[in-house]
Every structure is written in structure tokens, then in C-alpha cells.
Amino acid sequence: MTEFGLSPIQATARDDAVLKALAGFVMQEALGPGHKLPTERILAERLKVSRNTVREALTRWEGLGLVERRQGSGTYLKGAVSLDMLHMPLTLAGGNDFTSLMQTLEIRRALEAEAAALCAVRAGQTEIAEIARKLNIMEQAFHTRAGMSAEEDWEFHQSIYRTSGNPLFEQIIAAMHELFHRFWEHPLGVRDFGHASFPFHRTIFECIAAHDPEGARAEALKLIATVEDDLKRGAAKLKLSGQK
Amino acid sequence: MTEFGLSPIQATARDDAVLKALAGFVMQEALGPGHKLPTERILAERLKVSRNTVREALTRWEGLGLVERRQGSGTYLKGAVSLDMLHMPLTLAGGNDFTSLMQTLEIRRALEAEAAALCAVRAGQTEIAEIARKLNIMEQAFHTRAGMSAEEDWEFHQSIYRTSGNPLFEQIIAAMHELFHRFWEHPLGVRDFGHASFPFHRTIFECIAAHDPEGARAEALKLIATVEDDLKRGAAKLKLSGQK
DNA sequence: GTGTAGAAATTGGTTGGACCATTGAGCCAT
DNA sequence: ATGGCTCAATGGTCCAACCAATTTCTACAC
């Protein structure tokens, strides 16, 4: 079954060598997200490779979302980097129809419920306070801006994923989120999209604060159900065009 | 709610333009995995960009596992490419420890249960027959080879994901599966890994055939639980090294 | 004719140097 | 202080080579 961990050694692997050295440097210097790392020219000189090679290596990290390049400014770390890191690029094919939207929600339904349950189990006082903070910000934005609180809403959810203790939840759900919003270029649908989900944010939080995993799971499912409902209503409203 | 579709316009985005053009070319020519795509030099000439830029673009695709470069031979497609693709690089920090294994299982627990439930709802006679076939193959392999049936086991599960009607399940769980097995370089753990999960394959199938979504979900959860249990037992068995 | 070793062409990998576009810091006049 | 200016630093692009692995072609021996 196992395909032997033997990777066919490549005669030329300067890129990887550069990345390994750079990862070592990052760990040694204890650099974290936001920190700026050496100039391409400096790296090229220090590592005794061409600047072009350095660029290809950094391009890989950029593609992995580990690093952000700002022209005229520098290259900055965007995530935690360590030597023993596993990268698993996943490419999802999408379609622009109602079905695809629903499919992203089916994934979210499964993951969101599990993350909420895990969060309820593992959240400590600090994490609960943080989630409460995000919840208050979101509720306030919701009231002052009459429902326009997508940004704060998303941050509230993210704090839950993080507290689940499993980084994969945040990464995968974030991908679903992006996939969903990429198809949502046309807000022709329901005008008050998201209103129905509002009350469940607080009920989810209360279950988490009470360390009630099954309750949190149930409330998360209810929340997703309202979104699915909104979506179906929107699709029915304009079932004239773009159905296929 | 939307965070303003205004993406910070980037003056320079030659790389992306190259990839977009190349994706269009691949679709137009109906190229699939294994096919060879134009030389870097030719692409540079045709697209009126430097070969260097072409290389950075291809490096991105290579990092995403979409393409494979063979020096002296050419660049070959390794996966399906379409214009509307979402690339989601998953990064799992921490390396070779027990925690990472468990994290992939937490994701599988959520998705596997949901997929089984959806499958029970949506499976028709044809799909049920196909799943039954895979189940029989797997059970036979299990008995004749004394438990070594990982390949057939996986195919059985895949047929369930496909029948769920949502391709995202198969893609994401496949990623988790690969992630899991990449950590599993050391079968030092439990000798009869997977034995405990065997009976639940048939119970899951029976629930699906009976169109019982909640039953299928429950059985899927039991199956994952046995795997988690095996894993914990294996970890306890060699808790001397590599625990951190 | 056939097979094989070696030359030649092809192709990705690397190098070094140059220039452009953007950013940010310092400076100066208002 | 503020706004605009210059100017150095930095990432982005381009070019023209050359290196290394692979493939293809060719000529020679049999």
C-alpha cells in the first residue's frame, strides 16, 4: 500500500535547498508572521545562488501562502514556517451554478458542526473571552449597519475554528468560504441574506461557553440551515436565468 | 455584507496573466493529465513575455501539483486544469507526530459521516449495486490476505463519496487520506491496524441500501472511532519516542 | 538490414547583469 | 505640521548566455 517514501532524488534541487536554508533561518531567528525577511539580493549573495533561483523558491512559498511579497517594500512572512511542515495543495474545481453553492455549504455543514463541538470541549477561559469579544463586535456592527456585518461575522467564526485546536478546520472552511463568495458576484438574490442566521451566533457561543459540544453542534447546524434556506429562496426567486 | 469586490489592483501581474492564458490554452486544446505542454521558450515567445516570467508561472503550477517538469524532456500536465479553479494549499505544522494524524481524522470524522448520510439519501439502485460490488471485493481481499486490504478498502469508501453527489467530499477526504498516509511511514504501531474497522463497512452499506441516513452517519462515526482508537493504542505503545 | 554507441538537438535549470515600477524614508519649501 | 520632492531600496521583468538531463538522429560495425 505505501508507496515507499523514496522520492526520486533530483540532481538539481537548488530551489528546495534554498527553502530549507530559509526555513532554518526563520526558525533560528524566531521570525513570525508579519516579520520581514532578507532581501532577494541578500539571500542570493549569502546562499551563493542566483537571485533568479531565490525568486523561484520564494514563488513557491508565495503560492503556498506562506509569504507575501510587496514590490518596493520587501518580502514578509504570512504564516508560521518550520522545517517539518507538510504542504498539501488542494485544487477544487468549481462551477458557477446554484449546485456548486449548495455543495460548498454541505461541506461547511459537516465541518462547522464538528468545529463548534470541538471548540466547546477545548475552549478555555481565554478563548471563550476572545470569542465573546468577536461576537459583541459582530452584533454591534449588525445593528449599526443594518445587517452589513459579513466581515465581523466571518471573524467570529474564525475564532471558533482556531479554538477547535485543529488548524485544518480553518483552512478548509476558509476555502469553502472563498469558493462560496466567488460565485456570489450577483447579490440579485435575497436582499436580507444572512439576517436569519444572526440569532444563532449567540446561541452557538452560549453552548461553547457552557462546554456543551452537542448543543454547539446543533446550533451550528441550525445556522447553516438558515443559509441554505436563504440560498434556495434566492434561487427560486430568479429561476428564470442561469439555472443550468 | 460583501467586503467590496475591490481587490487592490496590482500593476504587475504578468504571472497570473500567463497562467490564465495557459489555462485557456489547455482547455481549448482539451489537454489532460500526461499531455505535454509547449516549451518554455515557445510560451515566452508566443505570450510575448520573458522566459523567466513563464518559469515563475510554471513554478506556481508545479508547487500546486498541477504540472510536472522533466529536465531535457518537457513539462507535462499532472492534473485537470480549468479556468475557474480554487487552489487551497493546506499546511500542517508539527510534522511527524501523533497530533497531526488525529487532526486529519477529525476532519474525516466530520466529512465521512456527512458523506455517508448524503449517500444514503441520494443513492439509486445503480449506485447501491456499485457500492455492494466494491464491498464484496474488499471483504474477499480482507479474508484472503488476512487484513491487508487497504487498497480495496479505500475504493469502497471512494464509491460512497462519489455517490454523495458532491465531488468536494472526495477531493477533500482524499487529501486527508494522503496526508494521513504520509505520516504513516512507521508501521511500528499496532500490528493489526484496521482490523477493528472491518465490520462497520458492511453496516454502513446496509444503512445506505436501506436509505437510512442517520444510521449511515452513526456507523461511519463508529468506523472512524475504531481508527482513532487504533491510533491512540499505537501511540501509547511507543510513547517512548517522538511523542512531542 | 540490424543494433548500438556516440554526436547533435531539444528542453528544463541556473547564472549574471541590466532596467522598470513601486514603495518608503528623508528633505525642503510652504 | 503639511504637502510635494528627491532618492535609495526592493520586488518584477527582461535578456543572453551557459549547464545538465533527455531525446533524437546518425554513422559505424556486424
Image (spheres, coloured by chain):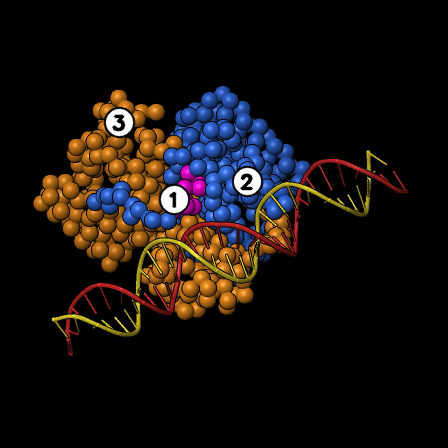
Chain colours: A blue, B orange, C red, D yellow
Which portion, as a residue range, is magenta?
Answer: A13-20
Q: Is residue B76 visible?
A: no
Residue assigned mark 3: B235
The verdict on residue B49 being magenta is no
Above or below — where is A53 with respect to A80? below
Give the residue drawn at x 28%, y 40%: B181
Q: Magenta span: helix, strand or loop, mainly?
A: helix
Q: Mark 3 falls within which chain? A: B
Task: Tell me residue A4's x, y (percent).
Answer: 24, 43
Circle 1 packing at 10 Å, graded few (<14), some (14-19), many (20+), is some
Relative to the observer, which residue lies in front, A131 or B86?
B86
Residue A42 got which mark?
Answer: 2
- Under circle 2, the secondary element is helix
Relative to the observer, which residue lies in front, A204 or A6?
A6
User: How far is disc 2 from disc 3 in space, using C-alphas?
Assistant: 44 Å
> Relative to A201, is B38 on the left or the right?
left
Q: Which of the two discs, 2 and 1, labels the residue nearer the N terminus? A: 2
